[in-house]
Amino acid sequence: MNATLGARRRAADRTATVLITGCFLLGLVPLVWLLYTVASKGWHMVVTSEWWLQSQRGVGFRDPGGGALHAIVGTAEQVALCAAISVPVGLLVGVYLVEYGRGTFARVTSFAVDVLTGIPSIVAALFVYAVAITTLGGQRAGWLVSLALVVLMLPVIVRSTEEMLRLVPDELREASYALGVPKWKTVVKVVVPTAFSGLVTGVLLGVARVAGETAPLLILVGYASGMNTDLFAGFQASLPGMINDQFVNLGSGGQAYGLDANGNRVPIHNFAPDRLWGAALTLIVIVLVLNLVARLAGRRART
Amino acid sequence: MMTGLLTVAAVAIAGCSSTSTTAGSNTGSPITGGAKTSAAAEVNCSSGTLNAEGSTAQTNAITQWINDYTKHCTGATINYNPTGSGAGIKNFTAGQVDFAGSDSALNPAKGEVAAAAQRCGGSPALDLPMVTGPIAVAFKLQGVDKLTLTPDLVAKIFTGKITSWDDPALKAANSGAHLPATKITVFFRSDSSGTTENFEKYLKAAAPADYTATPAKDSSQSGFVGQGKAKSQGVAQAIGSTQGGIGYVEYSFAVQDNLSVAAIDNGSGPVELSKNSASAAAAAATVVGTGNDLSLNLDYATKAPGAYPIILVTYEIACSTYTDPAVATRVKDFLAYAATGGQAALAGLGYAPLPASLQGKVLASINTIH
């Protein structure tokens, strides 16, 4: 009796282990596949110095050379402005909801954040387009992309801030109150530092969420193949924008052809796929590096 | 690093006489870079940024011009976003871009002419024909790389009256070819496109009995059966990856993917698509625009021997007067280059240059922009 029960339990345990490990490995397949594909097709662009130092100005899809600096700068600027707006607002809203929010206003705020989470990026982009361009008659520019990205980044930061603050044990707060520390000081000196690395992770998740966002770029700013550091005027490149631009000349993936002066078809080398994969890899690398840096910073701040 | 580049380039073209009006403009020396530009042309450079948007059909041409022009004029930056003729006109009239690329002239019936004039501060906008782009009827079919189609057959295929490659009517027109019993899959443009409008205009003019829809940029009323694909490259990719696929796409995109292109028989024998056969058809066009506006009326039903009839002429649409004179100079300088030195760069890209008679008119019109 006991022996059979033990055997059954062992079998169940074995089965569950195999199933869960199997699911885990299955889940890894697309991730590893994707990373391998992007890395293997993009690395030879990314390892050159010109990739990080030059723009695509004057470089056609048949011409070698050029880099992604214009796109990296554009993405960095747009995401930085977006983060500069979303991070303080998102953190404060998160703190409010966990530490102070009671009653109807808090419930409405929480509900609004839920609604924001579900807004597709294209809707955020069209909203900004309708307000800034159709209604106010503005010009398309990089900062409008940042505004649309705020709509996407804000709920991510609010939600993760909430989660992280809720993880802080109430005993810490109570200990602080017991020492006669006012509530605001408890939040600033006890709760937030305790949750700091989690908050940083949340912010980075937000950055990662918006850095590869494409819909606002297509609607709110034109793509420039040269360098434009001005967020507030003119077309501006970005890494997703560059991927989209290279896609125009991608061809069917096989040998690309052009015409010679007599109109005969001749094989040519099409650089668009290389640049497309290069830009994709660059985007992944940048988000990854940001992630690592923040994790290190978070770890150091805690100890 | 940018400064270094600029200095080197400025030294390289120093010593040229200056005729442009904007500060910091350089003039002069023929563009020698770019293997496709053989004809020497005087190029006026003006510094600053121009933003343009529109037709995907002229992407490869205008990108080549921009690359050659900005290599020569290092102070100039020109951006062109291939988002489709409809989007180009929309963003031009909304004041979002300095000029538009479009495969169709502004349409007065849709209020485009009035809206553009309003954007240009009351002065009319100009339709400037700049490139002849042959539209290829491209297909992919195992074992078949040569195909002759008449306008009736093209219309019947695209409207779903012929659904299989071994249809007797197709066999009759292609006696030598072995046509398999593959299903025909039609691809057309799903986005607003001048290519669609010109292709429909051709069908309407050359096969009136089989094609009755009203030509429009939007393909929703076209009566085409099959799948809509976004942008020229979307259609080309779809054809290339579909056995039995057929679609209309601007020639350079068909070349890039090495798609087979049908010869068109408008009544005087099959005509293969080439830069010369497309130019021959463009020469039959008549200017219908008034004043400096050069919108064209193409003769799609032409029976001229050796003329490939399915062409589009892609325009740059610019203001005749800009509120900012610096922008006017930039537009003028770039378009003047495109209409002169730039034309030589087209042959290798699958476009046909402007007929000489038209080129003179275009240049004269560009020179009135201020």
Image: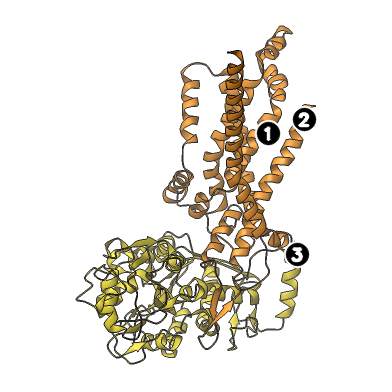
Few, some or many C-alpha atoms within 10 Å of disc 1 (few <14, some 14-19, many ≥20)?
Answer: many
Q: Residue at x 37, y 66 (%)?
A: B187
Element class at badge 3:
loop
The picture places residue B326, in percent across and down from the top left corner, at 55, 69
**Circle 3 is placed at which residue position?**
B1
Which residue type does callout 2 highlight? Ala
Could you give the CA–CA distance between mark 3 and mark 2, rounded to whole angstroms? 37 Å
Residue B229 picture quarter: bottom left
Write down the colour of chain A: orange
Give the letter of the chain under mark 1.
A
Q: In front here: A217 or B42?
A: A217
Using the image, determine if residue A30 lies above or below residue B128. Answer: above
The picture places residue A269, in percent across and down from the top left corner, at 61, 73
**Circle 1 is placed at which residue position?**
A200
Residue B244 picture quarter: bottom left
Q: Quadrant of the N terminus of chain B?
A: bottom right
Which residue type does callout 3 highlight? Met
Q: Residue at x 65, y 13 (%)?
A: A170
Q: Judging from the image, what is the letter of the chain drawn in yellow?
A: B
Q: Are marks 3 and 2 in contact (CB under 8 Å)?
A: no
In the picture, measured across the screen, residue A222 lies left or right of residue B117, that is right
Q: Tell me, for residue A301, which label it has, or none.
A: 2
Disc 3 and disc 2 on one polypeptide chain: no
Q: Residue furthest bottom?
A: B305
Could you give the CA–CA distance between mark 3 and mark 1, rounded to whole angstroms? 35 Å
Q: Are marks 1 and 2 in contact (CB under 8 Å)?
A: yes
